[in-house]
Amino acid sequence: MRLVAALAVLLLAVPAGCGSGDADPDRGTGAPATPLRVDGNRFVGADGREVPLRGFNFSGAEYACVEGDGFFDTPDGGPPSERVVAAMRRWRGARAVRVPLNEQCWLGLASVPAAHAGRAYRSAVRTFVERLNAAGLVAVLDLHRSAPGDGVPRGQEPMPDREHSPGFWRSAAAEFRTAAVVFDLFNEPFPYGDTDSDRAWRCWRDGGCTLTSVNTGRPYVAAGMNELIAAVRSTGSRQPVLAGGIHWAESLTGWLAHRPDDPLGQLGASFHAYSFNEYCSALRCYDRDLAPIARQVPLFAGEIGPTLTVGSAGVDAACPRSAVRGGGFADSTLDWLGAHAAGYAAWSWNPWPDCWALVRDWGGEPTALWGVGLRRRLAAAQGGG
């Protein structure tokens, strides 16, 4: 998400393992999730059957470790409990949970608190992934926060950095070589801030461009999508990878012309959809830019937000629930994605006191409009996979 760090959990949120509707000891329905592969423009399982990647984000691991609050944005700072994961799974039709991660915390670099970094951070993420997979949910692991040099990754960089980002993906890919995961290579690239230019797309694919770090204010050399894919494949990992477009992943105009090279052909495209998108938030853009991609590779909306009556300025700090309305942008976008067999992860399954929250508590009680609407949509789509 291009905005500042999300708000902390509700003060009234009940501890992990408790909450409304969480008395049911069920730890998930259906078989455990198994590794996926790309077949044409679909994700399929080991049996060759399509696995629609529909679900939501669970935010927190991208910022809690930097802020010294733990590994995740949960009451105890630990990975969501089995009961919380079971509450996620009770959103019938959900098949995927996108998990934003932090480069420095994963690698254990000196710029972040040691107590919540390195081996301990990786162990907490692995525990969450294992719980998701056991409940039949695929984990979409996203490199969300990063920083070059000794930078503290508090804000989103315009591109991954050559100093650390390839190392992050070599480590993460090795860690999850046999897990049911998809690798979202970089959250929201915005090289040069360009909406659509050849220099931005070449920087995106090939790297080697010099950009200014959001976190340090100093120039750094960016790593491109091809470098990150090579880092993943160097480990022997065969898991699918996603490459999000430029301009905060909302512009995919040049994606096919600058398509990254995955020697295994396990590549999909990622798009972020918000009602305040500046470049692509209408059906005519989806038909023009996204539909040609969806015909060739899997298309996944790694983030999609509710229909808002306000813009992006200050929306995290002052966004009352009354600013969310039903219908409109969110429904038309989700309808379009469904009609084109594209996946999505709504932002976000966190009990926050803001517009983005899909749930009111750790038991999975949906929020009035965004949560209720998304949960109904997932359940209705369940019959299709």
Image (spheres, grey):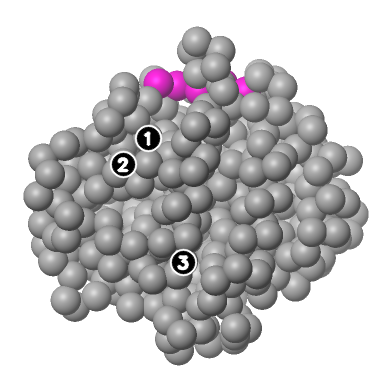
Is 37 in the magenta?
A: yes
Q: Look at the image and tell me whether residue 362 can be seen.
A: yes
The label number, if any, that marks residue 89 in the structure image: 2
Magenta residues (range): 34-38
Label 2: which secondary element: helix
Provide residue 203's location: percent of width, then percent of height: 77, 52
Q: Look at the image and tell me whether residue 70 can be seen.
A: no
Rendering quarter of residue 154: bottom left
Q: Marks 1/2: CA distance?
A: 7 Å
Label 3: which secondary element: helix
The label number, if any, that marks residue 273 in the structure image: none
Label 1: which secondary element: loop
Looking at the image, the residue that sits furthest to the top is: 47
In the rendered structure, are the residues bearing label 1 and label 2 in contact, judged by CB atoms less than 8 Å apart?
yes
**Disc number lying in front (1 or 3):** 3
The label number, if any, that marks residue 370 in the structure image: 3
Q: Counting residues from the N terminus, which is met first, the one under dot 1 or under dot 3?
A: 1
- Pointer 1: what residue? 137
Q: For the point 61% across and 63% down, which residue is it?
A: 330
Q: Marks 2/3: CA distance?
A: 18 Å
Which secondary structure class fits the magenta region best? loop
Q: For the point 41% across and 49% down, which residue is it?
A: 99
Q: Counting residues from the N terminus, which is met first, the one under dot 2 or under dot 3?
A: 2
Q: Amino acid at mark 3?
A: Trp
Q: Amino acid at mark 1?
A: Leu
In the shown orientation, is residue 201 left or right of residue 131? right
Provide residue 366's location: percent of width, then percent of height: 34, 62
In the rendered structure, are the residues bearing label 2 and label 3 in contact, judged by CB atoms less than 8 Å apart?
no
Vertical order, 294 against 358 (above or below): above
Q: Counting residues from the N terminus, which is met first, the one under dot 1 or under dot 2?
A: 2
